[in-house]
């Protein structure tokens, strides 16, 4: 291959030419400067070279493209980029004088652009124009000999032209030529290393090593190099390093030229043609004499040999820093500077510490790793956007030391022993800041390179060009909204952090999209080359990129189906044989059907048979069946797919089967039989399809042919020594089998039946008796040998009948043993099957656990008239009983049994309606395994059924973890269902609906027959139902105690209608925090409250004839239900406490952690009051854990550590999970959670802003009742602000007490001062602290104010003004901080402006008609005369150097317009503030002034507007009701006159309130229903209101029943209906004349279920509290 001439890099310390573009005017000034200063001065010009000298460096132009020419070629209208001034990489001594006169004018801009385009402008520009035609870049080098010859000829001609030009120059040279040549020689000789920290820094990269001719893949990688790698290195703020790029010596010219052209203008880089891999982790790195052994004049494609030698010589007695960087990754622009600073500082710190400890000298033997922390990953795909044109950005994992930026720092005398694998650095190396490192500081540790703020220090391109395909996101990958938000926030970082403009990324994305299949195919070709990955998993990923499964497709127009019967006993063998081989196929164009025995009773079997296909890229179906159909049945026939249904299909889609079956009707069908313990070569499917297609193409008469295709030889593997079957072998034994005559073709692995499109199989034939096909005859009913060893089989004793036992002579055995290595290598290469120690051990373990006789023979070995070939295997499988162990599930328990003749059900729930909150789920699973599972699995009485319901779509990681933790438990069933079942409603487990959601499809674990038997047993028996949350536990005697007590109690009630509750008494609460130990590693214990019936252990006991009326809410059981000891109706609705074995023994334990949905009773910090008794109780409790609850302390510590390590992630997900169905939705809970990762007490802000919220609290505002702003401010999504309250000195005492109480409980950074007005001026002013003296401080710390004030001096400051009667949305602070941060680039350092809301909500305590509804009246404020800055939530934003003029008033501000300026305002464009119009507080009219249609529309919109206040401002309906009552003094105010609207209610629909339930049993709160009485006149309903205008006259003798409906227009003496349910009536005996008993029939069940909602309606909307209902019921029923 002709080589490209080596190109010298320019020796320069300035900014690399070509990295940015320069305006035309600058170009013209440069040209003028060169001409003027050509006689003398720092510029020296020559027709061939330009040398720019100054005090620090010399620039020598490369032979191909000079820096000046590179500047000239830029377009005159190109935008000017920021100019960085990097430190010089090279130092030379400037010559004393340099005077050169140019005799050849420089090329014009147009000429230069035509001659040498920028390599980034087009794909063709990667090679010079005259070379484009040398060959097609799409062809490999071996296809382009002619092109290379032409290329060589062109180069020869070019060389001749150069020589001719040189001669012309010599003839025309000017007198100063010799001086110029001397100067150039001097500059070359003087190129040396330089570094301000006196260290040597080398960056290593590799490009296309060992893959020189994969041109398509190389061009794609070159595109990524120019997009991600080159800009980030060429624009480093510190250029004092040497970048060595090694590439294949035989690199294709197209790639070689493209790479070198991309580097033009960069002086401190060298490209070396070498396949060696150099790192700082081996062989002393750059210090080694061999470090430059592969760098010669011949191998140096680009760069300066002198510079390289200079760097190598400089390392002798200096610190060495070596950095790794892949060619498709990039580094932050400050990386080099930060890495060198960090290394210098750490080693200086070490030297200082040695001096401090009086060491005689510093041995300079330190060595450390530097790791990148926060970094980005650019993915080609964006899972949330299938049509993306730019890909997506993700935050990379930091739990390992990633390759980009991985650095090795060593002092001169270090004896470094670096960990070679980057992913093990953090695991096997201590952190430098670890206190344990103090004894041997910096002798083998790692430190993270600091990242400024939210910046990133590296970027990795994760694309299909990747060799390892690690963490490459595919188009169908799962994603979360948080990942999408990260992507959106990351794009603005590219340019400032890496000098990578987004359009460049979009260009690369387009290139990859346009060439995806080509580059993926070449990436597959490049696998397994030297120093590259060789993983079938990687190949699977790559093949999946252009194989779209889900339906039939085949390039040969064939239909190929692989059949595998998979018994339970073959689990281990299939994992390493059939699955590995099938997933390694070079083509995926086939359907794999796996037949499994009934798997419902064995979780391990079922899980494994669905888990592996889920991860596979193949078209796979897993069907549950007694056995496949007879072998004589053609896949085309309906009978072949008759066993498939939605019930039997365990994995896959019926549509996939239908697609292949339909395609088979008119095409050649290949059916391969493969045992679960068998394998076929990686090319088997492709070779067989190619061969079949060719045969059909050559002879059209084959359409009616059918025959078998079988392997001539195959491999066998045995797990034992063939000479002694009792002796185990570490890796097993392989041998090659030449089948004897007794073994028929169809008995061999991989036998395939091939049936032409018009062929018909005989109704009966014996496949074992088929004869070989004749070469001259049509292939019908015969078999052919492949002539190749295409199959392999695992011969496992007891699993497979060994028809070919090895009979070897001693010599034969020794030869076989000697040949094992070759056989293993052959099998691994051909089949991707390799048997190492762990795999062999796994198979042996399975063999020892299962006594098996045989595996089914391949399909097609039985006569057609016999039973299915797998019938014998079915009988075998039925006899296989898994041994009881921790790893398998035995389902022998399939029938209810109980010594007390009781049916006991335990209910638990896990992650319902939260299936994909993975981090939260993992933490809850950890608590389940620590607190819940041990206490239940170790119960002294196991005669109960534990039903755990979880989300049907539970994340597989959580699902597998839950089910695996339950292995070995027989009396448990895990159900995929979001239903909630309790014993308190709907007759509990006795109701058939209690198990309606438990089906074969929904049962994830357990035995359906067992569940059914438990329900059948409820007839005529006592039923005991117990609740247990998944993070709580029960005392080990709980089941025994409750069952015994229920039995003895109910024996006293012969009528068998008793029902009562069990409640746990003494119980423990485990808290994550410990108030007395800030560094606890185990948490703390306290006693739980017993004044209520807690959820763990809450039980419902019923006899067969009971008609229970249990209280649904657990915290009201003891309040609304009498104690069984005090009840006068024994055991007909009472509660009793579960006795403990000893008084000190707990009967339950509750985990109170940040994983809790309700956060009730959960401590959120180590702070809190505690006394010696609390600490003593904690000390006494730990010894009780194991004996009473089977929970070892070590398990608790392990859970505590897990929560600590993942606290922020799980809290964030708990916040996400709030408000999902059946979970809490409280702002108070959210505040608790947010406070867990917000540390108050000093300034902090992720955007480096300072935000202060000023609030005036006026004298007339009653803070105990009308502190409107409190909830909206406390529920902000971001807590990074300071809240200053300015409280009027004359405020009343109740308001002051209420305020102080709220402040003490607040999680915010809040202070309160007593002053009559807020200070004027900016918070940044020096006078601020004097205006807020400590003597006026009511609450908080002055140090907090000082912290914010100090931070504001050099940062952007936001000051939001809010009054106590105003509100802002929950996202207000977060939104304005984000928006300000995003706009900082638009403002100068002295600008300042206001941001105000565009519109806001107003709330009044009275409606326009003056009638105060329950929630007041909400409108949208529109006040044209109101200045923008007077609206609620107005924020003043000042840049760090801004000065506000004296006497400035905010009303002076004008709109900012398009250009921001000082003292203007902008509007947010959002409605994110609200104001409550309270009498005496605001100076605007309280009464709503709107009229006509606007008023009508607002009246209709009240529900939506109130929802806005609730959803966005955290102002709940009860807040609004409370405000109304407070303003009105708990009474109605006078009606104000206003227009009459036709929809003002005149009579109201009611909710009935009865004191008896339909069955006559008085529940605690009575029975509520919706009244539907057709005969009742509208005006007789409660709340009917007569409305008369001022001059109205009601006729004498008029009765309200005479009124008729008003219709569309209101008129005299009519009625309208409100359309709302805003009236209620209590049906009291002797008071009402309607029947008291409920008359409903069909809807009774629904109304019964709706009781909680209806009672909540009475409480929420009518202020009829539950205790009022209870009192009425007691009074009516004569109960004291």
Image (cartoon, helix red, strand yellow):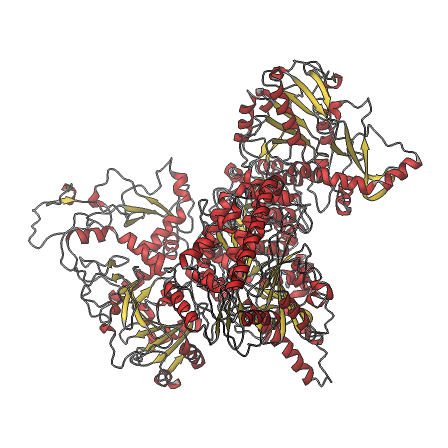
Q: Nearer the viewer, residue 1536 or 1098?
A: 1536
Which quadrant of the rendered structure holds the C terminus? Answer: bottom left
Q: Is residue 1108 left or right of residue 1193?
A: left
Image quadrant in which you'd find residue 437: bottom right
Q: Residue at x 90, y 39 (%)?
A: 814
Q: Is residue 1031 left or right of residue 1647?
A: right
Q: Examine the rendered structure and indicate whether residue 455 appears above or below residue 1294.
A: above
Q: How many marks?
A: 0
Q: Examine the rendered structure and indicate whether residue 1190 appears above or below residue 520.
A: below
Q: Is residue 494 left or right of residue 1260?
A: right
Q: Position of residue 658 (x, y in %)?
A: 53, 27
Q: Nearer the viewer, residue 939 or 1290?
A: 1290
Image quadrant in which you'd find residue 1456: bottom left
Q: Is residue 895 visible?
A: no
Q: Examine the rendered structure and indicate whether residue 758 appears above or below residue 804.
A: above
Q: Nearer the viewer, residue 3 or 403?
A: 3
Q: Position of residue 1118 (x, y in %)?
A: 49, 57
Residue extending farthest to the front is 171
Residue extending farthest to the right is 810
Q: Position of residue 1106 (x, y in %)?
A: 51, 42
Q: Position of residue 1448 (x, y in %)?
A: 25, 78
Q: Is residue 923 visible?
A: yes
Q: Examine the rendered structure and indicate whether residue 121 appears above or below residue 409.
A: above
Q: Residue at x 41, y 43 (%)?
A: 1648
């Amino acid at each position: 291959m002709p080589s490209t001439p080596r190109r010298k890099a320019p020796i320069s310390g300035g900014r690399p030419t070509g990295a940015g573009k320069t305006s035309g005017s600058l170009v013209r000034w440069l040209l003028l400067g060169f001409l003027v200063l050509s006689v003398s001065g720092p510029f020296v010009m020559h027709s061939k070279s330009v040398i720019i000298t100054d005090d620090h460096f010399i620039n020598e132009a490369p032979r191909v493209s000079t820096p000046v020419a590179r500047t000239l070629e830029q377009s005159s209208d190109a935008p000017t980029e920021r100019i960085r001034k990097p430190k010089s990489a090279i130092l030379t001594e400037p010559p004393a004088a340099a005077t050169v006169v140019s005799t050849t004018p420089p090329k014009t801009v147009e000429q230069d652009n035509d001659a040498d385009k920028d390599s980034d402008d087009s794909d063709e520009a990667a090679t010079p124009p005259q070379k484009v035609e040398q060959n097609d870049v799409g062809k490999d080098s071996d296809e382009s000999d002619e092109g290379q010859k032409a290329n060589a000829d062109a180069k020869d001609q070019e060389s001749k032209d150069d020589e001719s030009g040189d001669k012309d120059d010599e003839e025309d040279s000017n007198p100063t030529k010799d001086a110029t040549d001397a100067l150039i020689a001097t500059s070359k000789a003087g190129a040396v290393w330089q570094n301000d920290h006196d260290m040597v820094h080398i960056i290593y990269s590799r490009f296309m090593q060992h893959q020189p001719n994969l041109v398509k893949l190389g061009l794609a990688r070159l595109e990524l190099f120019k997009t991600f790698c080159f800009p980030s290195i060429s624009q480093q703020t510190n250029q004092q390093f040497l970048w060595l790029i090694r590439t294949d010596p035989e690199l294709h010219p197209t790639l070689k030229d493209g790479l070198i052209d991309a580097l033009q203008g960069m002086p401190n880089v060298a490209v070396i043609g070498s396949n060696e891999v150099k790192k700082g982790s081996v062989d002393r790195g750059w210090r080694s004499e061999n470090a430059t052994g592969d760098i010669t004049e011949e191998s140096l494609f680009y760069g300066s040999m002198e510079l390289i030698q200079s760097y190598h010589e400089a390392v002798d007695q200096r610190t060495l820093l070596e950095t790794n960087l892949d060619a498709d990754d990039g580094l932050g622009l400050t990386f080099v500077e930060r890495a060198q600073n960090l290394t210098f500082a750490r080693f200086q710190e070490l030297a200082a510490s040695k001096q401090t400890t009086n060491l005689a000298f510093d041995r300079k033997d330190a060595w450390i790793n530097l790791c990148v922390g926060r970094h980005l990953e650019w993915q080609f795909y964006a899972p949330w956007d299938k049509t993306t044109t730019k890909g997506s950005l993700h935050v990379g994992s930091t739990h390992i030391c990633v390759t980009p930026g991985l650095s090795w720092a060593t002092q001169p005398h270090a004896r470094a022993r670096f960990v070679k694998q980057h992913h093990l650095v953090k695991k096997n190396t201590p952190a430098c800041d670890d206190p344990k490192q103090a004894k041997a500081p910096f002798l083998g540790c790692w430190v993270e390179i600091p990242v400024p703020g939210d910046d990133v220090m590296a970027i990795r391109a994760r694309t299909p060009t990747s060799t390892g395909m690690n963490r490459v996101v595919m188009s169908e990958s799962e994603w979360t909204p948080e990942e999408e938000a990260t992507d959106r926030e990351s794009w603005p970082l590219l340019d400032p952090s890496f000098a990578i403009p987004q359009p460049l990324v979009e260009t690369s994305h387009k290139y990859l999209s346009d060439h995806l299949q080509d580059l993926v195919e070449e990436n597959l070709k490049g696998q397994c080359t030297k120093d590259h990955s060789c993983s079938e998993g990687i190949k699977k990923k790559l093949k999946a990129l252009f194989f779209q499964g889900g339906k039939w497709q085949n390039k040969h127009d064939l239909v190929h189906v692989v059949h595998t019967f998979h018994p339970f006993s073959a689990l281990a063998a299939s994992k390493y044989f059939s699955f590995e081989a099938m997933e390694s196929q070079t083509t995926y164009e086939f359907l794999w059907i796996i037949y499994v025995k009934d798997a419902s009773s064995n979780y391990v079997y079922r899980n494994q048979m669905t888990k592996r296909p889920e991860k596979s890229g193949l078209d796979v179906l897993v069907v549950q069946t007694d056995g496949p159909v007879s072998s004589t049945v053609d896949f085309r026939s309906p009978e072949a797919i008759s066993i498939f249904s939605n019930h039997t299909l365990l994995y896959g889609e019926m549509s996939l089967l239908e697609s292949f079956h339909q395609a088979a009707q008119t095409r050649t069908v290949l059916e391969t039989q493969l045992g679960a313990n068998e394998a076929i070569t990686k090319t088997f499917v492709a070779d067989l399809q190619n061969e079949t297609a060719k045969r059909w193409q050559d002879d059209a008469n084959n359409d009616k042919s059918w025959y078998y295709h079988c392997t001539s030889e195959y491999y066998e593997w045995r797990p034992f020594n063939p000479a002694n079957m009792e002796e185990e072998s570490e890796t097993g034994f392989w041998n090659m089998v030449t089948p004897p005559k007794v073994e028929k073709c169809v008995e061999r692995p991989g036998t395939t039946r091939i049936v032409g499109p018009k062929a018909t199989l005989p109704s009966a034939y014996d496949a074992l008796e088929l004869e070989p096909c004749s070469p001259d005859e049509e292939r019908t009913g015969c078999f052919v040998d492949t002539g190749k060893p295409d199959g392999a089989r695992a011969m496992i004793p007891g699993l497979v009948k060994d028809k070919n036992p090895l009979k070897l002579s001693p010599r034969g055995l020794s030869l076989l043993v000697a040949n094992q290595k070759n056989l293993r290598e052959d099998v691994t290469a051909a089949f991707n099957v390799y048997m190492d120690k762990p795999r062999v051990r796994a198979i042996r373990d399975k063999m020892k656990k299962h006594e098996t006789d045989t595996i089914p023979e391949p399909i097609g070995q039985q006569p057609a008239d016999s039973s299915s070939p797998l019938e014998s295997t079915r009988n075998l499988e039925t006899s296989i009983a898994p041994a009881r162990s921790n790893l398998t599930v035995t389902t022998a328990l399939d029938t209810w049994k109980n010594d007390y003749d009781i049916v006991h059900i335990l209910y638990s729930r896990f992650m319902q309606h939260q299936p994909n909150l993975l981090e939260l789920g993992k933490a809850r699973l950890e608590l389940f395994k620590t607190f819940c599972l041990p206490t239940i699995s170790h119960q002294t009485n196991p005669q109960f059924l534990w039903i755990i319901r979880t989300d049907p779509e539970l994340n597989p990681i959580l699902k597998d973890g839950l089910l695996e933790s339950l292995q070995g438990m027989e009396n448990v069933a895990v159900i995929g269902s979001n239903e909630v079942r309790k014993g308190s409603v709907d007759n509990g487990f006795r109701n058939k609906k209690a198990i309606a959601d438990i089906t074969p499809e929904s049962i994830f674990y357990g035995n359906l027959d067992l569940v059914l038997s438990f329900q059948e047993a409820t007839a005529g028996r006592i039923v005991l139902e117990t609740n247990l949350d998944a993070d709580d536990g029960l005392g080990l005697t709980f089941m025994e105690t409750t069952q015994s007590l229920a039995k003895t109690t109910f024996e006293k009630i012969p009528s068998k209608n008793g029902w009562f509750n069990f409640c746990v008494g003494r119980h423990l609460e485990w808290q994550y925090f410990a108030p007395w130990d800030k560094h606890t590693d185990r948490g703390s214990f306290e006693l739980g409250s017993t004044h209520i019936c807690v959820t763990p252990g809450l039980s419902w006991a019923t006899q067969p004839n009971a008609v229970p009326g249990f209280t649904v809410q657990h915290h009201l059981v003891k309040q609304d239900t009498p104690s069984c000891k005090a009840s006068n109706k024994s055991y007909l609705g009472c509660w009793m406490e579960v006795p403990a074995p000893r008084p000190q023994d707990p009967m339950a334990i509750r985990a109170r952690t940040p994983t809790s949905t309700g956060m009730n009773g959960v401590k959120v910090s180590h702070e809190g009051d505690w006394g010696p008794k609390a600490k003593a109780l904690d000390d006494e409790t730990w010894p009780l854990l194991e004996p009473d609850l089977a929970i070892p302390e070590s398990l608790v510590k392990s859970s505590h550590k897990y929560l600590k390590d993942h606290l922020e992630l799980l809290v964030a997900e708990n916040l996400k999970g709030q408000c999902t169905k059946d979970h809490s939705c409280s702002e108070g809970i959210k505040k608790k959670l947010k406070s867990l990762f917000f540390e108050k007490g000093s300034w902090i802000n992720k955007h480096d802003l300072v935000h202060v919220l000023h609030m005036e609290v006026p004298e007339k505002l009653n803070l105990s009742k009308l502190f409107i702003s409190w909830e909206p401010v406390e529920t902000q999504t971001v807590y990074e602000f300071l809240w200053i309250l300015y409280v009027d000195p004359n405020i009343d005492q109740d308001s002051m007490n209420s305020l102080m109480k709220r402040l003490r409980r607040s999680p915010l950074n809040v202070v309160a001062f007593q002053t009559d007005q807020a200070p004027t001026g900016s918070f940044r002013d020096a006078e601020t602290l004097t205006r807020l003296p400590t003597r006026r401080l009511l609450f908080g710390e002055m140090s907090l104010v000082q912290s914010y004030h100090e931070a504001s001096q050099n940062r952007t400051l936001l000051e939001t003004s809010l009054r106590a009667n105003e509100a802002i949305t929950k996202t207000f602070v977060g939104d304005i901080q984000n928006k300000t941060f995003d706009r900082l680039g638009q403002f100068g350092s002295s600008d300042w402006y206001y941001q105000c809301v565009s519109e806001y909500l107003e709330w009044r305590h009275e409606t326009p008609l003056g009638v105060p509804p329950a929630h007041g009246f909400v409108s949208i404020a529109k006040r044209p005369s109101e200045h923008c800055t007077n609206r609620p939530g107005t924020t003043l934003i000042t840049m760090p150097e801004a000065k506000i003029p004296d006497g400035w008033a905010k009303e002076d501000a004008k709109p900012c317009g398009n250009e921001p300026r000082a003292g203007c305002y902008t509007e947010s464009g959002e409605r994110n503030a609200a104001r409550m119009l309270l009498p005496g507080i605001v100076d605007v009219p309280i009464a709503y002034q709107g009229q006509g249609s606007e008023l009508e529309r607002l009246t209709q919109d009240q529900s939506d507007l109130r929802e806005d206040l609730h959803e966005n401002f955290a102002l709940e309906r009860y807040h609004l009701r409370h405000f109304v009552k407070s303003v009105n003094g708990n009474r109605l105010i006078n009606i104000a006159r206003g227009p009459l609207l036709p929809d003002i209610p005149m009579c109201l629909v009611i909710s009935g309130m009865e004191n008896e339930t339909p069955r006559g049993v008085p529940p605690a709160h009575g029975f509520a229903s919706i009244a539907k009485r057709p005969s009742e006149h509208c005006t007789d309903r409660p709340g009917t209101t007569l409305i008369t205008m001022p001059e109205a006259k009601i006729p004498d003798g008029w009765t309200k029943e005479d009124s008729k409906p008003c219709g569309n227009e209101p008129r005299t003496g009519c009625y309208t209906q409100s359309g709302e349910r805003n009236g209620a009536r209590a049906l009291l005996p002797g008071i009402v004349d309607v029947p008291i008993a409920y008359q409903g029939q069909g809807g009774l069940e629904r109304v019964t279920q709706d009781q909680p909602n209806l009672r909540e309606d009475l409480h929420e909307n009518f202020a009829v509290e539950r205790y009022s209902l209870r009192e009425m019921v007691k009074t009516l029923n004569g109960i004291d």
